[in-house]
Image (cartoon, rainbow, N blue to C red):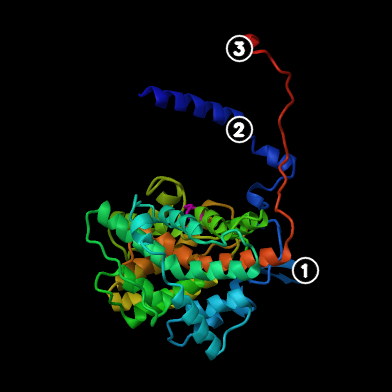
Amino acid sequence: MKKNELYLNEYAALCREADRLEPEMFDRYEVQRGLRDKNGNGVVTGLTNISRIDSFKMVDGVKTPCEGKLWYRGYDCIELVKGFRGKHAGFEEVAYLLLFGELPNSRQMWEFRDILAANRTLPTNFTRDVIMKAPSSDIMNSLTRSVLTLASYDKNCSDNSIENVLRQCIALIGVFPMLAVYGYHAYNHYQNDESMYIHRPSKKICTAENLLMMLRPDKKYTDLEARVLDIALVLHMEHGGGNNSTFTTRVVTSSGSDTYSVIAAALSSLKGPKHGGANIKVVEMMRDIEKNVGDWEDEDEVRTYLKKILNREAFDRKGLIYGMGHAVYSLSDPRAQVFKGFVQKLAEAKGRNRDFALYSMIERIAPEVIAEKARIYKGVSANVDFYSGFVYSMLEIPLEMYTPIFAIARIVGWSAHRIEELINMDKIIRPAYKSVMEEREYVDIEDRS
C-alpha cells in the first residue's frame, strides 16, 4: 500500500473516532436527525405558496394516512396532466404557473414559449471551450460546471433584484437541456469513442421534443415519446418545497448569493443517490432481478428474491428495495399513479409488456415483503422513481442522463423558490446545532502522548 494511502487510512480512523456521536444522544437532547422526527415528519422551516404535498388527513382528531396528492399553486397535479389533452407543452404551461402563480391564457402561453425559445442559446464557443473541455461521465458535475461558468458571461451576475433574477432563471431554464445533452455527447465521444452529435435546439418545438431531438443522432421521436417525456418533466418539476435540493436553494439564496451559485448548490444536492439519483438505483436493481429470477411470472420466485435484497443477501446488499416508500407519502405517490398509465402505453408501443408486468408485480408485492420485515409507521408504496427509470430506458435515454433530466425539470421549482425567498425572507437561514463536546485543558506539545 502506498504511503499516502496509509496516512489516509490512519487519518480517516481519527475522523471516525473524533466525530462519532452515540445515537441515543439525539433522543437525550431532543434533536431530530435529518430534520425529521421518529414518524418521518419534517421540521417546518418556512412558508411557501408554490406547492404542497398531502399524505395524511385528520379523521376524528386522529392523523390518518391518505392517498397522496401533489398541488402546484393550488392545482392538483393529476388534473393538470389531464388538462394537457395530448399537447406536448405541459412543461411550459406548468413552468409559467409555478413562476407567476397563474395558469397562462393562450396569448401568455405563446409569449412565454417564445421567451424560452429565445433563451435556448449559449455564448459564442461555450460548447467548445467549456462543455467539450474535460468531459465527464458524471453529467451532473458537467452541468454544474457549465452553470458556474455562465456566471462569468453575465455582467449583472450579482444583482439580486427580482427582475434580474427572473431573467437569469428563465435563461437557465432555457439552456439546461442544451448543457446536459451536450455534456453527455462530449463524454460519449471523448470517453466512449462514439460519434459526436451537437444538434441545435429548434424554436418551433417544446422542451420535451427538443430534448429527444438533441439526444438522438437522427433527431426523430414519436408523438407518444414526446408526450410521456413532457409529463415526466412536469411531475419532477416541483415537490412541496421540503426536499433537499429546494431547501439548499433557499438556504443559499438567504445568504445573498447569486443565482448561478444557488443553482449550482441545488444541482450538487440533487445528484446524490438519496435524492435525484434514486431512479438509477431502481434500474440497476431491476436488471439484477431480471438476471437472477428465472421465471418473471412466478410470484413466489420474485418474492423470494425481493426478500434476499431486503436481507442484504442480493443486489447491492444495502437492504433496500429501491423505488419503494417515500419520506412523505404513505399510501401512494400521486406522481407514480399518473406515470403508470402512460408507462403501460409506452411499454405496449415499445414491445416491453413483459418488463411492465414484472414492474407491476413488484409494485404490488414489495410493500408486503417490506411490511413483513420491518415495523412501518406509515404505508409503503411505489414512488415516482420506481417507474421513471423504466420510462427513460424505453425512451432510449442513456443512464448518465437520468438525473440531469430531473434537474432540467426541477430548475423551474428551484427558480420559483429562489424568487419567493428573495421577496419574503430577509434573514439568513441559520440552523442551530447542540454542542456535546467536553471542555479540555490545553497541553503543551512536548507533554502530549
Mark 3 or 2 closer to N-term? 2
SS at badge 1? loop
Residue behind mark 1: 61
Q: Looking at the image, can residue 240 be seen? A: no
Q: Earlier in the sequence, mark 1 or mark 3?
A: 1
Foreground: disc 1 or disc 3: 3
Residue 246 got which mark?
none
In primary-sequence order, the first of circles 1 and 2 is 2
Circle 3 residues within 10 Å: few <14, some 14–19, many ≥20: few
Q: Is residue 259 above or below residue 10?
A: below
Disc 3 designates what residue? 449
**Residue 214 drawn at (x, y percent):** 33, 70
Q: Report the residue marked by disc 2.
A: 19
Left or right position of 338 against 241 = left
Q: How many marks?
A: 3
Q: Nearer the viewer's eye, disc 1 or disc 2?
A: 2
Between 348 and 217, the one nearer to me in the picture: 217
- Rounded to the nearest angstrom, the CA distance separating label 3 from label 2 is 20 Å
Residue occupying the far top of the picture: 446
Q: Which contiguous range is marked in magenta?
A: 271-276
Magenta portion: prevailing SS class:
loop
